[in-house]
Image (cartoon, grey):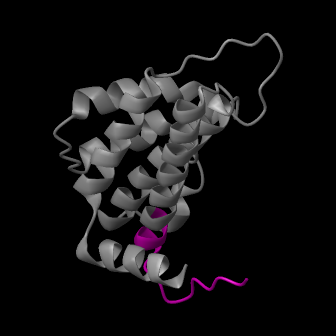
Amino acid sequence: MTTTTSGFDPSLMRFASAREMQQTAVLVAKHNRETGARRSIGAIYFLMGFALELYLKAFLLRSGLEEMALGRRPYGHDLRRLYVEASARGLAFPEAAELEVMVEALADAHADFSFRYMQANSTIRVPEPIEATLNLLSRLDDHLARPEDVALARAEIARE
């Protein structure tokens, strides 16, 4: 299968990717809950971290920040910096305090790829419970969604 992204708004692509990561994390967490498994916890947090990063980048692109700037310092994978910049540019999320806690909980492990490259006997700080964190991401998705985001999501579902 080949996917073409030419002609799409970069913020729309970031938003769609964020939604995909968030929804995949929900599916894995649901599987764990239904089967009683505790597998894939690192993968769930990996997906949550990248979903959060991409939601923030989608917002920043919509607020006028250049796409090239987001891929390098001071932004890159720095959730704290992305959140601070999004807040400064008017991110008016009703649950800002909870989102800030989530950013703080995920930031270090996300920036150094600890969720991707877990080491034996390592300790990683994560937001708990997983379900509450996933629900917060879902509400952020709802808050940031624009009509064109919804249309893209519907087109993706129809294509499947």
Q: Is residue 19 left or right of residue 29?
A: left
- Point out residue 132 in the picture as x, y percentages from the top left corner: 36, 29
- Point out residue 137 in the picture as x, y percentages from the top left corner: 37, 43
Image: magenta residue range: 1-14
Quarter of the rendering occupied by the N terminus: bottom right
Residue lying farthest right? 120
Task: Determine whether 32 is above or below 73 in the image.
Answer: above
Q: In this view, does 129 lie to the left or right of 87?
A: right
Q: In this view, does 107 lie to the left or right of 147?
A: right
Residue sitting at 18 percent across and 46 percent down? 92
- Point out residue 156 in the picture as x, y percentages from the top left corner: 48, 78
Residue lying farthest bottom? 7
Residue sitting at 36 percent across and 57 percent down? 60
36 or 46: nearer the viewer: 36
Residue sitting at 57 percent across and 40 percent down? 31
Q: Main secondary structure of the magenta part?
A: loop
Residue sitting at 52 percent across and 31 percent down? 33
Can residue 74 be seen here? The reply is no
